[in-house]
Image (cartoon, coloured by chain):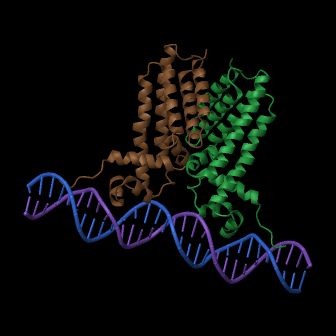
Chain colours: A brown, B green, C blue, D purple
Amino acid sequence: MARTKEFQIDEVLDKAVNLFWSKGYNGISAEELVQGLGLSRSSLYDTFGDKHSLFKQALKRYREKITGDVIAHLDHAENIPEAIKEIFIWSQNSALQATGPKGCFMVNSRIELAPHDSGISDVVQENWQALEDAYQRAIKRGQEKGQISKSHNPRALARFVLTNSWGLSAYGRGAADKKVFDDIIKILLSTLKSD
Amino acid sequence: MARTKEFQIDEVLDKAVNLFWSKGYNGISAEELVQGLGLSRSSLYDTFGDKHSLFKQALKRYREKITGDVIAHLDHAENIPEAIKEIFIWSQNSALQATGPKGCFMVNSRIELAPHDSGISDVVQENWQALEDAYQRAIKRGQEKGQISKSHNPRALARFVLTNSWGLSAYGRGAADKKVFDDIIKILLSTLKSD
DNA sequence: ACCTTTACGGAATAAATGTTCCAGAAAGGA
DNA sequence: TCCTTTCTGGAACATTTATTCCGTAAAGGT
């Protein structure tokens, strides 16, 4: 055997997620990545391949960690409207905090790269579908429990919730007003419950 | 007097809008701009300044033409829910067409640049505010006419509509399913009308 | 017809970007 | 302890990028 790596792959990948999430694929340079990730150029290329390959791995890591958590939250929820509200509040908090990357890494990547990069588009597409399915399952259970209106089918409502989530992700990427989040969350929940 | 320009500034700006809208600020090179705009490098820099300045002018042009049209449409509308529906159908059509830039140039720019570029952020911010105000005016008239539910105030509903519009803009930037647009439009309009 | 002003085309430039390469050092097994 | 493996730091590379410069040509007013 030989020398072992001086870094944890997942830790570096988490840093890569934050860097790409914050500045985008084209917005960050190889030099900034080397600085931000804290390992040498050669280790970076040996371990993760080129910039595009690193980006894709970071995107997949986000899919597992962040999106995975949201899906788990929905799948374990008892009170569905409350669970959805919590997800939106979480998004609101991250938008209003001074530090940390803004918006949603998947939405950002879809907008920056999806039209011209089918490899990235595939990852982003799977992420939307997984979320749509998770919302759909949760909303269906919510309807069976009488927590959510049955005036629209679960699939359509899932897409509706997700569209609002994406809209707020885009909004939260710029100067954001808490009142806008409050308004959206309030109306969205009243739409889910009404009937 | 001296020689006159061989191009129309606004025509070039329209082309610049399409190029930046399609590939983003960092995604397009100066070389591609020269090719796509059809004028020489020196004319380009003499007339519009550097790349960043050209981008800002393109963004402002979009604000006048595209956003301006939407606001005018809302301000002249008699049937408000119908007018809103038309705007969303227009967005749907552009997303489903094979050609042409996808999504909304303002949303794209907010996501790519707003967090790190205050000059661009200002333009994007003004665009959101102008649209929010226009939706607010229209929805207020709709409520007075009995076309729109009064269970939420016009400002909150305006923000809600705009968030859905932005969510669909992000969605429409990748592979888009007509059924998703149909679902969102249907639920959004039923939310506006219900009481 | 001339002269001033300004657009034009393209070469030229300096900086930044993504990537590779190499020599040395460190780790662990034999 | 030695040897093999492979990680590491940094120099080096080719390419691309954004921008400037300059000689030439064209337009319009006098």
User: In screen coordinates, is C23 left or right of A40?
Assistant: left
Determine which quarter of the picture holds residue A68. top left
- Who's the residue at 80% across and 23% down the image? B145
- Who's the residue at 70% across and 51% down the image? B60
Between B3 and A188, the one lying in front of the other is A188
* Number of marks drawn: 0
Name, please, the residue furthest toward the front. A98
User: In screen coordinates, is D29 left or right of D23?
Assistant: right
Between A158 and A67, the one lying in front of the other is A67
Measuring from the top left, give residue B184's x and y in whole percent: 61, 29
Is residue B77 in sight in this rendering?
yes
Between B68 and B129, the one lying in front of the other is B129
- Who's the residue at 75% across and 60% down the image? B9
Measuring from the top left, give residue B189's x and y in whole percent: 68, 25
Q: Quadrant of the C terminus of chain A?
A: top right
Is residue B83 in sight in this rendering?
no
Measuring from the top left, give residue A53's x and y in whole percent: 41, 51
Determine which quarter of the picture holds residue B185. top right
A109 is higher (above) or lower (below) than A181: below
Measuring from the top left, give residue A51's x and y in whole percent: 43, 55
- Who's the residue at 72% across and 59% down the image? B12
Determine which quarter of the picture holds residue A71. top left
